Amino acid sequence: MGTQVDEYLEAEVQQLLTDGRIAELGITVQRRENVLVLGGEVESVQRRDEICRQITTHFPEVEIACDIGITRAQAPSEVEEIS
């Protein structure tokens, strides 16, 4: 059984996201029942995985759902055909 997810825990996770080694201001934290959902977008899969790893390592007793997307930072390599 995990730790109770409340507004205090949500604020702690948000604080960890915005300072220190993570420093991501665009990541959101939402409570869904007893799960914290991380959302937003980052520039790479490696960055997303590192953020999720650090949060789950810092809060091992909390169920975390990592729903962070990847922003395409480069131009597409193919032409997109629109019909």
Image (spheres, rainbow, N blue to C red):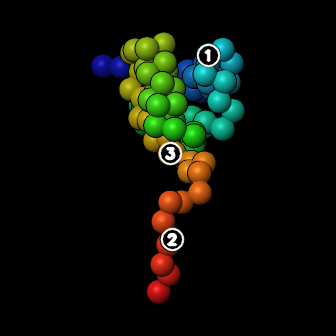
Sequence-first disc among 2 and 1? 1
Looking at the rendered structure, which numbered label has been put on residue 79? 2
Q: Quadrant of residue 65?
A: top left
Residue carrying label 1: 21
Sequence-first disc among 2 and 3? 3
What separation in Å lies between label 3 and label 1 (alpha carbons)? 19 Å
| SS class, disc 1 | loop
Mark 2: which amino acid? Val
Between 3 and 26, the one nearer to me in the picture: 26
Q: Quadrant of residue 43?
A: top right
Sequence-first disc among 3 and 1? 1
What separation in Å lies between label 2 and label 3 (alpha carbons)? 22 Å
Label 2 Cα neighbours within 10 Å, binned few <14 / some 14-19 / many ≥20: few
Label 3 Cα neighbours within 10 Å, binned few <14 / some 14-19 / many ≥20: some
**Residue 11 locus on image (x, y percent):** 63, 24
Residue drawn at x 57%, y 34% as measured from the top left: 29
Residue carrying label 3: 69
What separation in Å lies between label 2 and label 1 (alpha carbons)? 37 Å
Quarter holding the N terminus is top left
| SS class, disc 3 | strand
**Residue 77 locus on image (x, y percent):** 50, 60
State if disc 1 and disc 2 touch (CB < 8 Å): no
Residue 50 visible: yes
